[in-house]
Amino acid sequence: MLARDYLDCGPRRWPRTFRHLLADPIERKLPHLHVPTVVARGSRDPTVPHGWAREVVALLPDGHLVEVAGAGRTLNYSAPRALANIVRPLIPDAARVKHGDACRRTVSIQAVSRANV
């Protein structure tokens, strides 16, 4: 699936996109995410090691790590029911985040990946 994505974007585009990815590490943004956040990964995900997922959760003000045993990358394809079971309980307990004069319900589900360089 990943190789197909690279082919779809074209041989000139993906190296430029990858450079932008490396110049904008997610780790700098995570401490500013002040909503309940779940980092969900499959236990057999080759691109998101367990240790790095733990580091990501540690950077989140309200982060939790959930691993789906036996699942690989892209839980929405490899384990959709398990992912739905992870996400569903978060929806009623969504955090209220002030935005100007208005309040809005916000649920943040972060699927994070790390580029191995």
Image (cartoon, grey):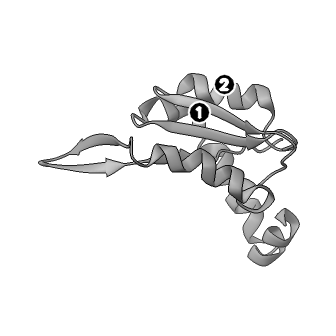
Kind of residue indicated by mark 1: Glu
Percent x, y of residue 84: 62, 54
- Quadrant of residue 49 within the rendered picture: top right
**Residue drawn where x is 80% and y is 58% of the image:** 78
Sequence-first disc among 1 and 2? 1
Mark 1 and mark 2: Cα distance apart in space: 9 Å
- Quadrant of residue 40 within the rendered picture: top right
Placement of 62 over or under 5, stated as above or below: above
Image quadrant holding the C terminus, namely top right
Q: Nearer the viewer, residue 33 or 88?
A: 88
Instruction: Pick out the residue farthest to the left.
Output: 101
**Residue drawn where x is 45% and y is 36% of the image:** 36
**Residue drawn where x is 81% and y is 68% of the image:** 6
Q: In the rendered image, which residue does mark 2 sit on?
A: 55
Pair 1/2: label in front: 2
**Residue drawn where x is 28% and y is 41% of the image:** 96
Q: Is residue 85 left or right of residue 53?
A: left
Few, some or many residues within 10 Å of mark 1 (<14, 14–19, 20+): few
Label 2 sits on a secondary structure element that is helix
Image quadrant holding the N terminus, namely bottom right
Q: Is residue 1 left or right of residue 87?
A: right
Q: Could you tell me if the residues under marks 1 and 2 are in contact, i.e. CB atoms within 8 Å?
A: yes
Label 1 sits on a secondary structure element that is helix
Percent x, y of residue 100: 16, 47
Q: In the rendered image, which residue does mark 1 sit on?
A: 27
